[in-house]
Image (spheres, rainbow, N blue to C red):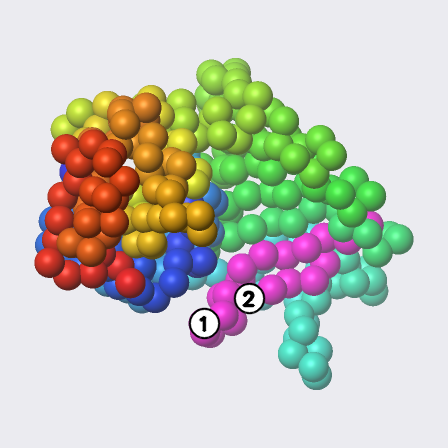
Amino acid sequence: MDYELVNRVDTLDQATLQAIKERLQKTNGKLLCLGSMPNMRNFLQANGLKGTTLIDLITKRKYDPKSYRYFNEVNIPDSGYVEVLKNGSIFASYQGDYIAREYIFPNTRRAAQDIRFLNPDGSLDYIEEYTSDGKLYSHLLYANNVLQEIIFFNLQRQPVIRYYYYNNEINLVTVENPKTNAIISKYDSLNEFIIAELAQKIDSKDTVGINFLGIELSALAQTSSQNIYYLNEDPLDQNGNVRANLAMILNDQIPYIAKVVLTRRQYYEIEKQQLPVNKLEVVSHKVSK
């Protein structure tokens, strides 16, 4: 399988997204997102793509192509109700008190995105997120308005992945058996979690393309796949030197990137630096922008 690996899909610039779409359409490949993305179904449909996220692979989530959760179908107490105020904001009430505020996915017919439950003092208690096909996605748990934990559910509404926070940073990630709640894997950081879990989801038969040398690069560290970097920026930094991570790839200090695809102009700029060029592959058109 051919994959295009990105950290998030909602922050891609149009040029990069268009280049990714063209490559995936040629190979019948899939977009693979490292970050959580409740709206993945809608994004894929809007761009004519197939794909998933690392979270959804672990929780074994599949997307329903047609369903969604209407705004008044959120999970609230049985005698509670949802109302739309004159200014368009949506609140849930229970026994005469507002207990939560609801948000909807943009450009939809009031499809529920999340509902944010409040404590009596008005601080956040927890957020319940839904996927764009209307299924329970996650719970974000708060204390004193500070995020403490995120729980990601499978389609059976069972917890599978937990992010634990300390001082606003993830300091523990667990993957558990959804039936027994026994911990299967434990990681001390989000990066460690991504590296180990991604390596379990792709194998030597797969080809993975990346467009950035950030978390997408480090995520591939333990993979056995054929990994390609599509160079979409100036290969030289502000001092006229080849960018550090790119130089490490070319010198095989980052051996898990097998190929760098670039334009002829970019090739000549690197060649002048007297770095190895055996990993370089020239294309006649712009790689992404």
Task: Write down the quadrant of residue 12 in the picture.
Answer: bottom left
**Vertical comparison of 226 with 9: above or below:** above
* Callout 2 secondary element: strand
Give x and y (percent) for residue 127.
65, 49
For the N terminus, the image quarter is top left
Residue furthest out toward the right: 121
Is mark 1 in CB contact (under 8 Å) with mark 2? yes
Asked if residue 114 is among those painted magenta in the image, a careful observer would answer: yes
**Vertical comparison of 39 with 273: above or below:** below
Q: Is residue 192 left or right of residue 98?
A: left
Q: Residue at x 58, y 57 (%)?
A: 114
Magenta part mainly helix, strand or loop? strand
Highlighted range, magenta: 100-119
Identify the residue position indicated by label 1 in the image: 108
Three-letter amino acid code of the residue under disc 1: Thr
Give x and y (percent) for residue 288.
26, 59
Q: Which of the numbered marks, if any, corresponds to residue 104? A: 2
Q: Residue at x 50, y 37 (%)?
A: 153
* Callout 1 secondary element: loop
User: Distance from label 1 to label 2 (Cα)?
Assistant: 8 Å
Q: Residue at x 65, y 78 (%)?
A: 88
